[in-house]
Amino acid sequence: MSSNQKMFKNQSTQTTKDDINKYDSNLQSKIQDSGCGNCKAHALWDDDWQNILIPCASCAEENNYLWNGEECLGVSGISASEHREQTPEEFVWIIKNLIQPRFKGDEKEFNEYIDRLPTNVRDLFNSY
Ligand SMILES: [Zn+2]
């Protein structure tokens, strides 16, 4: 019998308390490994907490607003409480009210920030 078969044979189909504890510690380390406090608190994870489905807004930004090959605006304060990705409208509100003031009138830097936004968000921002 190979060691693989042995391992398989020893696996119980019944979930024991030990399994749950092991699962919880795996889950904990997985979340710790993600390294982002916002994602730990607010990201949308898949059912077994293995992968982030929608990251936090700052991780989405760092990833050029792409996640799993699709445009992604991330989870922000407003949408976090509803466990969903933020909408372009919510994002534009946050840009105007929270992000823009952080640039303290530095128009060049703020314009560079705006240039990096997904086109639909940038267009919406410019239409206000
Ligand atoms: Zn994050």
Image (spheres, helix red, strand yellow):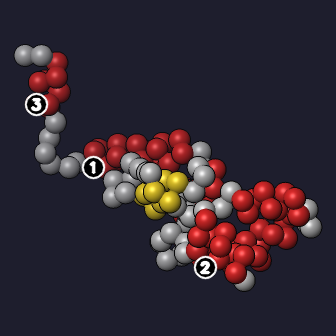
Q: Is mark 2 within 8 Å of ligand 1?
A: no
- Three-letter amino acid code at the position of disc 2: Glu
The answer to whether residue 52 of the structure is visible from this angle is no
Quadrant the N terminus occupies: top left
Q: What secondary structure is marked by label 1?
A: helix
- The residue shown at (27%, 49%) is 17
Q: What secondary structure is marked by label 2?
A: helix
- The residue shown at (17%, 27%) is 7
Front tag of 1 and 2: 2
Dot 1 crowding, Cα within 10 Å, few <14, some 14–19, many 20+ = few
- Three-letter amino acid code at the position of disc 3: Lys
Q: Is mark 1 within 8 Å of ligand 1?
A: no
For this orientation, the residue located farthest to the bottom is: 128
Quadrant the C terminus occupies: bottom right
Dot 3 crowding, Cα within 10 Å, few <14, some 14–19, many 20+ = few
Q: Which residue is mark 2?
A: 89
Front tag of 1 and 3: 3
